Amino acid sequence: MGIAISGWPLARAVSRAGQLGVVSGTAIDAVFVRRLQNEGVSDALRAVLDRFPLQSIVERVLHQFAQTRRAVADAYQNLVMLTHRSGEHAIDLLVLASYAEVALAKEGHDGKVGMNLLTKVQVPTAPTLLGAILADADYIVMGAGVPTNIPGTLASLAAGEPVEMPLDVVGPEAGTRRLRFVPERYLGGKSLSAPKFLGVVSSHVLATALAKRSNGPVEGFVVERPSAGGHNAPPRGAYEVDARGEPVYGPRDEINYDTLADLGRPFWIAGGITHPADVVAARDLGATGVQVGTLFAYCDESGMEPALRSEMLKTIAEGDVAISTSLRASSTGYPFKVVDAPNSLADPEVYEARTRKCDLGYLREAYAKDGGSLGYRCAAEPVSAYVRKGGDPAVTEGSVCLCNGLMAACGLGQVRGDGRTEPPLVTSGDSLNDVRDLLDGRSSYSANDVIAYLSPGSEG
């Protein structure tokens, strides 16, 4: 969920309760080093890091980021943005950060832990996957694209074999380049177990394509309906927008669950799962279970910044909070759910007051320059810079820096030169206000409360 909302504390709590806890792998290197700057190295983290196969990497990263604690008013030490040219140190950090997140989530229990990644974010994928494999992740969950190459990649990485990942390039010379990654030095000649792969799909059509075209086994599917938070798949084909400018989903977007069942793989339904009856309904459709985001995003173990989480819960308890599906917020071009959270980037005044800046860069797109070399741009960066790189200025209108906004939502927002901290961006599913039923007069709740509440037969 987002960036670090589903971090290792939440995933561990869910896994301990017998469910599949899934950590977010998005921007995991930045999350790791910012936590180090805030908190240093806890005993739990030290125990995990001591098991990492290359201690020279651990020593270098800790020397750079964990020597002194950052003051609240100080800026974070930023990482150099990732590109196809990123050097060994940047790649090492990705592997280490991913490893630590999964390893911490797996501590103290024998439950299952997975990691979620976005197919759209391509440069860090292979090193991040390897880190999860080194920590013995049980599942990899990926959507926001068609990740047909991931099952085979997982097998190759676990065996210590080099892999080549796609890098999509836009512009007049659009196409696909290749990113090569060699995992051998991290494995030391060992062969590890590959995690099982679950594809996040929006339709039975995509599930069928993923099952047939993937270069390895697809163990199952998470079927994400358009009511889910974060990025949504756009409606199929040409589509209309409603009076609010939100996409209208039609008959072509309806999911045929019988076709899904005929694929012979388990599937989990996501989007709008906020009551016990939703779990029963999913089972009745043939689903193995459900994927839950929104209810967990506001629980005690969530990575959401505590003051923001408390304010949101108080606001929800007192009345409905608006959620919109924006076609402009995300530079990816995918629809994106935006919560009308107080003092967030959903507020037009807060949005306008923020100086446009792209210094995390996970959602940048690669484009071909004259002569064939690659550059990187994002519709949320300064407009003049985006246009100078060949981008269409119309695309920048309403575009939100998801990287900085989501980093702020998990309490890791950058402090700018004028002393202001990056404002948060909050995303949740359409059924956010159903959190009120789970609260039932309380001011907070735990991950275990969510699981108990949703268990079939529960009356809330």
Image: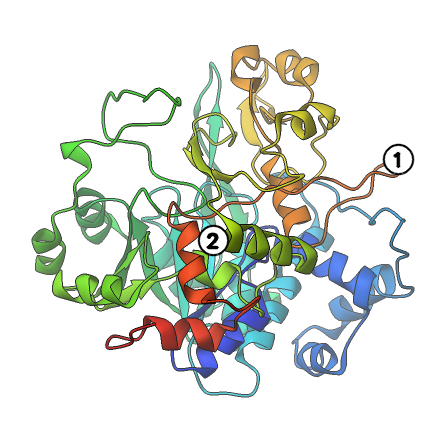
> Within 10 Å of the Cα at label 1, are there few (<14), some (14-19), or many (20+) other Cα atoms?
few
Q: Is residue 318 above or below residue 284?
A: above
- For mark 1, what is the residue? 417
Q: Position of residue 30 (x, y in %)?
A: 69, 52
Indicate the secondary structure of the residue bearing disc 1.
Answer: loop
Q: Secondary structure at mark 2?
A: strand
Image color mode: rainbow
Task: Mark yes or no: residue 380 visible.
Answer: yes
Q: Amino acid at mark 1?
A: Gly
Please state which of residues 44 and 124 is positioned toward the viewer in this rendering: 44
Q: Nearer the viewer, residue 279 or 328?
A: 279
Q: Nearer the viewer, mark 2 or mark 1?
A: 1
Amino acid type assigned to the residue bearing label 2 in the image = Leu
Mark 2, residue position: 117
Q: Quadrant of the C terminus?
A: bottom left
| Residue 223 x/y as whole percent | 27, 53
